[in-house]
Amino acid sequence: MKLTKENIESLDKLYRTNLVNSLSGFKSANLIGTVSKEGKTNLAIFSSVIHVGANPPALGFLMRPVSVERHTYTNIKETNHFTINHINKEMFKQAHQTSARYDKDVSEFDACGLTPEFTKTLQVPYVKESKIKIGLRFVEEQEIKFNGTIFIVGEIVELILPEEIISKDGYVDIEKAGTIAISGLDSYHVTKLIARLAYAKPGVEPKEF
Amino acid sequence: MKLTKENIESLDKLYRTNLVNSLSGFKSANLIGTVSKEGKTNLAIFSSVIHVGANPPALGFLMRPVSVERHTYTNIKETNHFTINHINKEMFKQAHQTSARYDKDVSEFDACGLTPEFTKTLQVPYVKESKIKIGLRFVEEQEIKFNGTIFIVGEIVELILPEEIISKDGYVDIEKAGTIAISGLDSYHVTKLIARLAYAKPGVEPKEF
């Protein structure tokens, strides 16, 4: 079927939200951990984390407009740091629950049954139940004028992961770590490797590793 | 194991590239179709497409710095339009092959064995082999000053997909469409649904649909 912009805009709001949120493809499943300047921890699920650069190592994510109170955003601006923690199949329900609208004085760690974990490097909480945990320093925000969303960039300052899932060439087997993928607003998926493909060159057939 | 920023920066370049590219979690797998003002089609694989907004419907993706020639970027700026096409398991090798460095006068459609498809609405090519195809109008670019990457935003103007994969509530079963996920630079994965979870509310246990 074919839908125009006008067709999409005339859809029921919830239907349109579900539809358009499905269109980007599979999404990363991460929990972002922060802390307020008063020391109150916060945890929120995000499906928009993407790779920004390998050198210097950096990740980014898109936030909804800050017209309503966004604890993650406020905390990042207050403390300059945040953590990104992969969601795995053992704790995806607790991770999903962090999307409920808790008051600022409630920590999603307590409310959702996840455990804050701290290192000597950073004051911001990691998620103990995650197997891949990344500590970041806030470096930049760019507002998308089109709809007021904000792209946040963080430089990786600490990385915690099981050594046995790192291949000889640096590739991390996130599937082995149980990391899952999201589709739409609320759908959680495990993955199964098809293949790794060698660096592509013109005139050479795609080769599996 | 724990790595600091200094540990990561001292790694071998290829090792670091593989490692850091694995950290964002699973990535969307899309082909971006464009055309130059001379009418030459171009196709390139991107793993950074994310949801930007449902109303107006918009998607975005991050591009590497334009310090070297980027055909996708040049074409989008010339024609103001592009397409996003989901990669499925039947054609992921052809999709991967589009990452080879072809000259500007070579169309990746021809070189990689994929078929351009046009509609009456847009002058830019869709990928016939994709089951979910999205036509977009370029609306904004934001440069990430940290490393010169560019976040491109497009408003959805046309959407082509099989009616039978759309649920009653608008959720699109992209798994049923064979859409795959990427990890790292070069790893392709099929998915298997664990569950859809209901809208989260404080004090209510996470419920499956």
Image (cartoon, coloured by chain):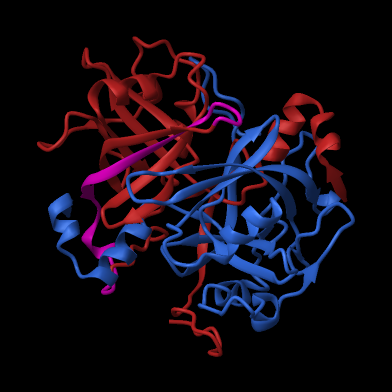
Chain colours: A blue, B red
* Residue B162 on the magenta segment: yes
* Residue A39 on the magenta segment: no
Against A107, is A81 above or below?
Answer: above
Q: Horizontally, is A105 left or right of B141 in the view?
A: right
Q: Position of residue B55 (x, y in %)?
A: 27, 57
The residue closer to the viewer here, A203 or B14, is B14
Q: Position of residue B125 (x, y in %)?
A: 24, 31
Q: Horizontally, is A125 left or right of A46 in the view?
A: right
Which residue sits at x=52%, y=29%? Answer: B149
Q: Horizontally, is A203 left or right of A76 in the view?
A: left
Quadrant placement of the N terminus of chain A: bottom left
Q: Where does the magenta region start and end?
A: B145-169
Against A19, is B108 above or below?
Answer: above
Say whether residue A39 is visible.
yes
Q: Quadrant of residue A198?
A: top right
Which residue sits at x=58%, y=74%? Answer: A98
Which residue sits at x=48%, y=36%? Answer: B62
Q: Position of residue B195 (x, y in %)?
A: 50, 74
The residue closer to the viewer here, A65 or A37, is A37
Q: Position of residue B177 (x, y in %)?
A: 36, 55
The residue closer to the viewer here, A79 or A49, is A79
